[in-house]
Amino acid sequence: MELVVFDKRVHDLVDENATIEKLDTGFVFVEGPVYLNGTYYFTDFQVDKIFTYKDGVTTLIDDKSDFSIGLTYDRKRDRILRATRNQRAITTMDNEVVCNNYKGIPINGSNDVIVDSKGIIYFSDPLSRELEGPQMGHPSTFMYDPDTDEMTLIDKTLGRPNGLALTPDEKYLYIDCTNTSTVHRVDLQTLKMELFCTFDESYGSGRCDGMRIDEQGNLYVTGPGGVWLVGPDAVILGLIKTPEPTANLCFDDRGLFLTATTSIYRVDTKIPSAV
């Protein structure tokens, strides 16, 4: 593994001698991983499929997923939620619609999705294709409370909102923006948003996409060249260079599971996930 060091604190997050292990390959464009009860779930977005990976075996579990992209688990960690592009909704794996509109207007087509400890769902909703029928006409990031059926618009200014992460205390939401290679931070009390950090696109192919956070508040963001590591003070600490452009990632019991274009990988890290 090649580790680009910008700040020595990166060595507290990952060992520079760690190995990126390729687990499987032959996919088209893998995305949206989540780790639940010892099993990795991930999407092969462009061919409309969802797979699992466990004990060295990859299994196709859904070959018509409404072009799901991001996956997450709900508050009780007993079911998986999907961000579906074609259905323009957040749904369960059983195709139950959880939410699909804002003030009666259909969402554009959700991309990434996360859930907080209270069960509130946060999702990015970029405007990335031509749509038919009523539409909002702008990209958005939302939060949805299933207990009250209330949808809140967090932001509509980012050109292509994508990956999401919550600080460990759940006071702030991070949103990365694909078309600007930036991460933004939102105060969830005021919904005020500020620029958090910007990545140097000269380090390789790939754009900001998936994002995770550890229990100390460090961000792990897929972007140009691989996975960027950012401290809670917005200082860019390092870059894990990856063999293929990496779209998304999730924590498991020992480190990070990566979905990188045609392949899935994993690498050990030193600090556990925030969840």
Image (spheres, rainbow, N blue to C red):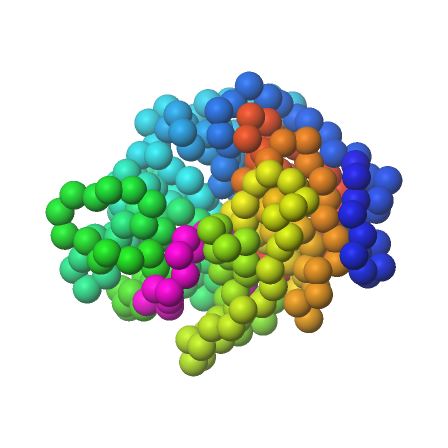
Q: Which quadrant holds residue 25?
A: top right
* Quadrant housing the C terminus: bottom right
Report the side of 195 relative to 149 (left or right).
right
Q: Nearer the viewer, residue 252 or 218?
A: 218
Could one spot residue 230 in this view of the protein? yes
Q: Nearer the viewer, residue 273 or 201?
A: 201
Could one spot residue 53 in this view of the protein? no
Magenta highlight: main SS: strand
Report the side of 184 relative to 266 (left or right).
left
Q: Is residue 9 above or below residue 108?
A: below
**Residue pictured at 54% horizontal, 45% vertical:** 207
**Residue pictured at 40% horizontal, 47% vertical:** 111
Q: Nearer the viewer, residue 160 or 80?
A: 160
> Could you tell me residue 202's position as x and y percent?
65, 46
Q: Which residues are magenta?
A: 153-166
> Could you tell me residue 17's position as x and y percent?
86, 40
> Could you tell me residue 55's position as x and y percent?
65, 26
